[in-house]
Amino acid sequence: MRTPSAGLQLGRFGAWFNPRYGDDARTELVVHAESLGFPTAWLGFGQASISDLALVERVLDATTNITVATAIVNMWTNDAAEIVEAYQRIAVHYGDRFLLGVGVGHPESITTFRQPYAVMVDYLDQLDAGGVPEDRRILAALGPRALKLAADRTLGTHPYLVVPDHTRDARQLLGPDAVIAPEQMVVLETDPTIARGIGRAWVADPYLKLRNYTNNLRRYGYTDDDIDGGGSNRLIDALVLHGSNDEIATALHAHLDAGADHVAVQVLTADGVNPMVAYQQLAGVLL
């Protein structure tokens, strides 16, 4: 396992917060997550332009020990030079608590096409030139070529919407040194019908309409029948774990058993329900 240089601590489980929550809410959510003992908070950003990393700095200001990671800074919509400047500003005070997650997102979000791999290489070159250390950045990667790039040029990979078999393949491909930190959605609900309803509402749109995710799911045996119509029960159950605290904890450990170093847990809820209720319960069995 590659270990971050002194100071940066991810732990085995982190809390992943979707950009559907506003900045005020997410700041409060991270403060609460830290109080529960979560060692890392992941801030999702999608395709947003966030070159000043203002929310990251705000969250770090509001907390004491928790590591804050971007998930992700989109390379298409955020100028690398501006990200370097923001990273260096934040690193002066919070270098040991900040992990810069970057990636190309999905092709449907861009208007000017370039080969995604070339974009990633160029962006990482610019981060190098700006002095962003390799072990303070992590790359969102799904396919083998991107995964190898993540291992060669960053701390490792933060893949989204993956199953433990992907984690296992990533570990076999990358060897013991790269950090593998997948995101995993969960619904703390024992009724499968209710849980699948919540999970399907989050997954079907947009993720099952994005070909980087659907192509990756096909690599692991899911078919058009699984992907179409909002997702089969089999697919939704794999992408959005549900059950009791202990059942979800066991399922999350499947990523660790497959070779992950860290799992970023994204709690899904019905609209308007505070996810920290579930995080508090999960903290008791995960941390």
Image (cartoon, helix red, strand yellow):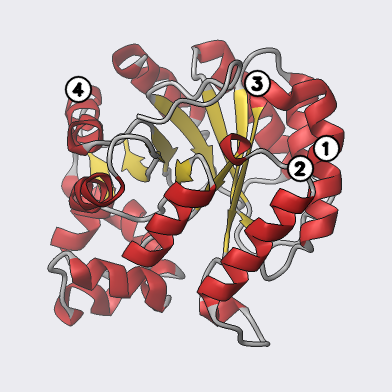
In-image side of 28 versus 157 (left or right): right
Q: Which residue is mark 1?
A: 88
Which of pointers 4 and 2 lies earlier in the amino acid sequence?
A: 2
Q: CA distance from mark 4 to mark 2?
A: 43 Å
Q: Secondary structure at mark 2?
A: loop
Q: Earlier in the sequence, mark 1 or mark 2?
A: 1
Mark 3 lies on residue = 31
Residue 10 vertical position relative to residue 275 in the rendered view, above or below: above
Q: Secondary structure at mark 4?
A: helix
Circle 3 residues within 10 Å: few <14, some 14–19, many ≥20: some
- State the separation of the CA atoms marked 4 and 3: 25 Å
**Gap in angstroms between the C-alphas marked 4 and 1:** 41 Å
Q: Nearer the viewer, mark 4 or mark 2?
A: 2
Indicate which disc, 2 or 3, sits on the residue closer to the N terminus.
Answer: 3
State which mark lies toward you, 3 or 1.
Answer: 1
Q: Which residue is mark 4?
A: 246
Q: In this view of the protein, which residue sits in the foreground, 87 or 110?
A: 87
Residue occupying image coordinates x 76% and y 61%: 49
- Taking depth in this image into account, of 181 and 177 the one nearest to the observer is 177
Q: Secondary structure at mark 1?
A: helix
